[in-house]
Image: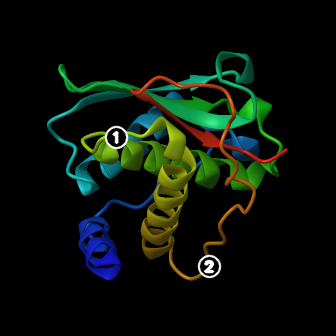
């Protein structure tokens, strides 16, 4: 069953556009984030949602997060926040790929928003989202893609039932 889901999601990304080029020194523009958002929104069949993206400073995110998602299922609206490149601890050339990955990660949370959420099992949800994100991103980027290994910890702080975050290990 797991393979069927991954295969179906993988087929969706095979027709996607190439990633936008990053700016000098790994800088990422709002336009680039918007392009990644639209490409992955289409690939993940989230066209019926109004989704926007924002590049935000670390102070606007919960500690140790690389991004988050807030949504309203009733109005089918969502906002993806991604960490500003200025606040990253990665080498500059790796930042654009990591920000695009965060967009994918948060959109998969949005896909799963239709399922009942159990606050006691958030770590299981995060593990599933990470695995699906890695599979899709690897299919899109090819064999040269190497996942960032330090993104598996779940924050201990409470989150609402309409919020999800991509975590970074310290």
Quadrant where the C terminus sits is top right
Residue found at the very far left of the displayed protein: 48
Q: Find residue 110 and name its label.
A: 1
User: Alpha-carbon neighbours of circle 2 within 10 Å: few (<14), some, or many (≥20)?
Assistant: few
Q: Of residues 90 and 169, which is closer to you in this image?
A: 169
- Classify mark 1: residues with Cα within 10 Å, few (<14), some (14-19) or many (20+): many
Q: Are marks 2 and 1 in contact (CB under 8 Å)?
A: no
Q: 165 left or right of 52?
A: right
Q: Residue 56 at what x, y percent from top left? A: 61, 22
Q: Is residue 17 above or below residue 52?
A: below
Q: Which mark is residue 144?
A: 2
Examine the image and state in which quarter residue 78 appears: top left
Residue sitting at x 55%, y 58%: 127
Q: Which one is in front, 27 or 159?
A: 159
Q: Where is residue 86, by image quadrant?
A: top right
Q: Is the N terminus in the top left, top right, bottom left or bottom right quadrant?
A: bottom left
């Amino acid at each position: 069953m797991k393979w069927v889901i991954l295969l179906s999601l993988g087929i969706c990304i095979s027709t996607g556009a190439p990633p936008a080029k990053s700016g000098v020194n790994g800088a990422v523009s709002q336009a680039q984030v918007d392009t990644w958002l639209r490409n992955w929104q289409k690939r993940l069949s989230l066209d019926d949602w109004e989704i926007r993206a924002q590049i935000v400073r670390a102070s606007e995110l919960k500690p140790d997060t690389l991004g988050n998602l807030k949504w309203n299922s009733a109005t089918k609206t969502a906002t993806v926040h991604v960490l500003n490149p200025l606040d990253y601890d990665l080498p500059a050339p790796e930042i654009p790929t990591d920000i695009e990955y965060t967009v994918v990660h948060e959109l998969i949370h949005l896909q799963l928003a239709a399922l009942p959420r159990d606050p006691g099992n958030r770590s299981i949800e995060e593990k599933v989202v990470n695995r699906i994100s890695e599979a899709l991103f690897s299919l899109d980027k090819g064999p040269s893609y190497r996942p960032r290994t330090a993104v598996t910890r779940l924050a201990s702080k409470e989150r609402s039932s309409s919020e999800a975050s991509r975590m970074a290990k310290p």
